[in-house]
């Protein structure tokens, strides 16, 4: 007996950017299909002709490409299937699962107000009339009596009394299909086996299940994901982080890091938290691990996971991303020597960074041009505890390191020997030397700073400081 191929889809509306909630839905669809050797398709639901834009469509595709979520086959545009939507509506009309409603907008408002007051669902006065009229009409679905039940892979068994459903519109008065009809026809035409989407669509599953049954089509398996909430447990908003995927990219997150975090937002597999390659995710992903409770954004965890991905990322890839950030700031002119300096220091830079913006901040001390500029607070460092004398003495000792001797271990040994000989704590030496070398910018261990700057640049920065502030008196 052959097993039916699993086919999922991500079906965004091109009326705005691809936000992280949509990206997570796409990821769950993608990995669920791939974990079972199925297919994942992309459908752009562009039937809202007024609000749908090419810019939004391009942004969605760009966001998915950046996250490396590759769809199978061609992109499907819902608007191209309008003829099938209309045909399905008329089939329902002919089989009396739907009817023509001639109510005007004003009449509908009165009827809906009355329905609300009585606590009943909307039923059109034309529901059981067969009289044709020569005026505009909508085609409404005739909600049957009884109950509608679905089995959901995430939410479990859901049962509705059909009296809770309005007779919803299938075709508008201008002849265009509504979402409620189009999505059923499109999923059927695309042979979608599993509809994985946000649980804000859960009530729609009840309506759509009735349409499937009325058309005699196989109902797909449902999986409604809990929505993402803000850290405070409230509905996700822009201030919480409901931003576009591209905005997270611009904040310095890696696609692999953001993808890893979004996967863990509502899904688990044992105690595993970090996934660094596609195979490891595909191997273990299952709807059984999806939590039905709302997920909360946790930016500390997002930063931690992204930082782990930066640690594992190829140094040349990080250099390319870092170079893009540096060039966008227009503050530093990169050349071959500076690029090599950045690449040599990359193991240290990435161990201290949560994202590419952090990486750029950590790298800034390597890019500074001589002479360095110091804040008034930093200048005070050179007035204390014989700082300039220590700078001069250490500079002399460092000059003795020749060629390959200039490395982290030897530099560290010179510093430790000086501290021991002078019987002073590291603070009296380390702070002024660090300021002289970095201008107070973020930096790693002092020996690493000296090593990555290189002998020539490091000694020149130290000598600049000595020459500039040699006449300062101790406070």
Image (tube, rainbow, N blue to C red):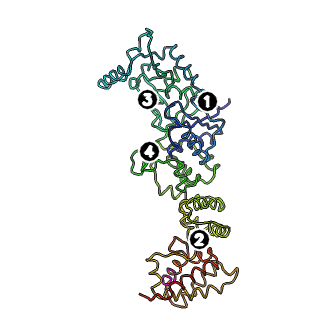
Label ID, residue 190: 1
Q: CA distance from mark 1 to mark 4?
A: 30 Å
Q: Is there CB contact under 8 Å for labels 2 and 3?
A: no
Describe the element under mark 2 as helix, strand or loop: helix
Number of the front mark, 1 or 4:
1
Residue located at (57% from left, 83% from top): 463
Number of the front mark, 1 or 3:
1
Label ID, residue 366: 2
Q: Earlier in the sequence, mark 2 or mark 1?
A: 1
Describe the element under mark 4 as helix, strand or loop: loop
**Residue assigned mark 4:** 294
Residue 263 part of the magenta-drawn span: no
Question: Could you say which is closer to the camera, residue 456 or residue 404?
Answer: 456
Q: In the rendered image of this protein, does residue 205 appear above or below residue 394?
A: above
Q: Earlier in the sequence, mark 1 or mark 3?
A: 3
Number of the front mark, 2 or 3:
2
In the rendered image, residue 191, in percent from the top left (x then y), is placed at 61, 29
- Image-based side of 17 in relation to 231, left or right: right
Quarter of the image with the C terminus is bottom left
As drawn, the residue found furthest toward the right would be 403
Extent of the magenta region: 426-431
Q: Main secondary structure of the magenta part?
A: helix
Q: Earlier in the sequence, mark 2 or mark 3?
A: 3
Q: Earlier in the sequence, mark 4 or mark 2?
A: 4
| Count of picture labels | 4
Q: In the rendered image of this protein, does residue 348 appear above or below residue 183?
A: below
In the rendered image, residue 312, in percent from the top left (x then y), is placed at 62, 60
As drawn, the residue found furthest toward the top would be 131
């Amino acid at each position: 007996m052959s097993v039916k191929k699993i086919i999922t889809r991500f079906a965004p509306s091109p009326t705005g950017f691809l936000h992280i909630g949509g990206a997570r839905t796409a990821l769950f669809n993608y990995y669920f299909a791939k974990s079972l050797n199925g297919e994942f398709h992309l459908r752009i639901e562009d039937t809202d002709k007024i609000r749908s834009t090419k810019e939004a469509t391009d942004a969605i595709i760009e966001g998915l490409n950046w996250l490396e979520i590759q769809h199978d086959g061609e992109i499907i545009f819902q608007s191209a299937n309008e003829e099938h939507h209309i045909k399905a509506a008329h089939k329902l009309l002919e089989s009396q699962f739907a009817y023509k409603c001639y109510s005007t907008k004003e009449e509908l408002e009165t009827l809906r107000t009355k329905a609300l007051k009585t606590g009943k669902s909307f039923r059109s006065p034309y529901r059981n009339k067969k009289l044709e009229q020569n005026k505009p009409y909508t085609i409404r679905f005739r909600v049957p009596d009884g109950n509608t039940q679905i089995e959901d892979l995430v939410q479990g068994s859901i049962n509705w009394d059909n009296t809770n459903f309005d007779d919803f519109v299938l075709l508008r008065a201008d002849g265009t299909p509504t979402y409620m009809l189009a999505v059923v026809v499109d999923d059927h035409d695309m042979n979608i086996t599993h509809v994985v989407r946000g649980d804000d669509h859960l009530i729609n599953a009840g309506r759509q299940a009735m349409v499937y049954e009325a058309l005699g089509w196989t109902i797909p398996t449902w999986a409604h994901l809990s929505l993402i909430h803000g850290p405070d447990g409230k509905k996700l908003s822009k201030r919480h982080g409901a931003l576009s995927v591209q905005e997270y990219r611009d904040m310095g997150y890696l696609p692999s890091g953001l993808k890893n975090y979004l996967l863990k937002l509502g899904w688990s597999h044992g105690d595993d938290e970090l996934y660094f390659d596609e195979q490891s995710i595909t191997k273990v992903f299952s709807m059984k691990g999806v939590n039905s409770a709302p997920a909360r954004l946790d930016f500390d965890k997002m930063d931690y996971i992204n930082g782990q991905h930066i640690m594992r990322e190829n140094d040349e890839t990080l250099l390319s991303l870092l170079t893009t950030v540096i060039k966008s700031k227009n503050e530093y002119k990169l050349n071959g020597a500076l690029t090599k300096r950045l690449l040599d220091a990359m193991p240290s830079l990435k161990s201290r960074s949560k994202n590419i913006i952090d990486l750029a901040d950590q790298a800034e001390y390597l890019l500074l041009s001589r002479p360095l500029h110091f804040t008034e607070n930093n200048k005070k460092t050179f007035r204390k505890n014989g700082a300039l004398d220590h700078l001069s003495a250490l500079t002399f000792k460092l000059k003795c390191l020749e060629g390959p001797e200039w490395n982290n271990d030897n530099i560290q040994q010179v510093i430790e020997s000086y501290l021991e000989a002078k019987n002073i704590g590291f603070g009296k030496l380390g702070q002024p030397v660090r300021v002289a070398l970095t201008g107070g910018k973020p930096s790693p261990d002092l020996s690493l700073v000296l090593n990555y700057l290189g002998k020539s640049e490091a000694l020149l920065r130290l000598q600049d400081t000595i020459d500039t502030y040699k006449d300062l008196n101790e406070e």
